[in-house]
Image: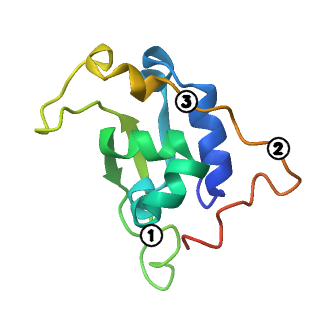
Amino acid sequence: MPHCGRALYEALLRANWSARGLERLVLLCNAFARYADLAIKLETESPCLSRILPHLHAEPLPSLPPPHHDALNDVCLQRFAPRAPDGARIEPSALPASFWQLPPPPPASEDEGRKGDEEVQ
């Protein structure tokens, strides 16, 4: 899912928002860590993305050789790996109930897959 809009990532996470669903999900996409600068906006518009950020394990892919070294430079493999505040690996069941309780999804719009593209390039 390289270069998808934030709303599409949010929809995928929401559709898989359970311990079992997230543990089975491996994403080849833009590094979600780049969205951390949008923390306030993420909490309201992308609650799944906001909540999963501290619990992701990301493996960057090797860079392409020149002249294409900038293409896909932010793509990595990411998977759900829950962590305690001290950084220790924990089971998903150890996460607080508030982690799993999501607000209702926002209403769908025509540009659903593109929403958020302007924020992280």
Name the residue at 17% across, 38% down: 85
Give the image location of residue 112, x and y in percent.
Answer: 78, 52
Comparing labels 2 and 3, the label whose residue is closer to the camera: 3
Label 2 sits on residue: 108
Q: Amino acid at mark 1?
A: Asn
**Crowd tier of the residue under label 1, counting other residues whose Cα lies within 10 Å: few below 14, some 14–19, many 20 or above:** some
Kind of residue at badge 3: Leu
Residue, disc 3: 102
Q: Nearer the viewer, residue 97 or 91?
A: 97
Dot 2: element: loop
Mark pair 2, 3: CA separation = 16 Å
Determine the residue positioned at 67% across, 50% down: 7
Label count reads 3
Type of amino acid at the residue the image marks with label 2: Ala
Query: In screen coordinates, is 34 left or right of 45?
Result: left
- Of callouts 1 and 3, which one flags the residue occurring earlier in the amino acid sequence? 1
Q: Return the x and y of residue 57 as percentages of the image width and height.
A: 30, 42
- Residue 103's place in the image compared with 20, above or below, is below
Image location of residue 84, percent across then percent down = 18, 32
Display colour scheme = rainbow
Q: In the image, what residue occupies the spot 10% across and 38% down?
A: 86
Residue at the disc numbered 1: 73
Give the mark, 2 or 3, whose residue is nearer the N terminus: 3
Assess disc 2: are there few (<14), some (14-19) or many (≥20) residues with their C-alpha within 10 Å of its C-alpha: few
Q: Tags 2 and 1 in contact by the CB under 8 Å rule?
A: no
The extreme right residue here reads 110
- Along the line of sight, which residue is nearer the eye, 45 or 6? 45
Is the residue under label 3 in contact with that under label 1 (CB below 8 Å)?
A: no
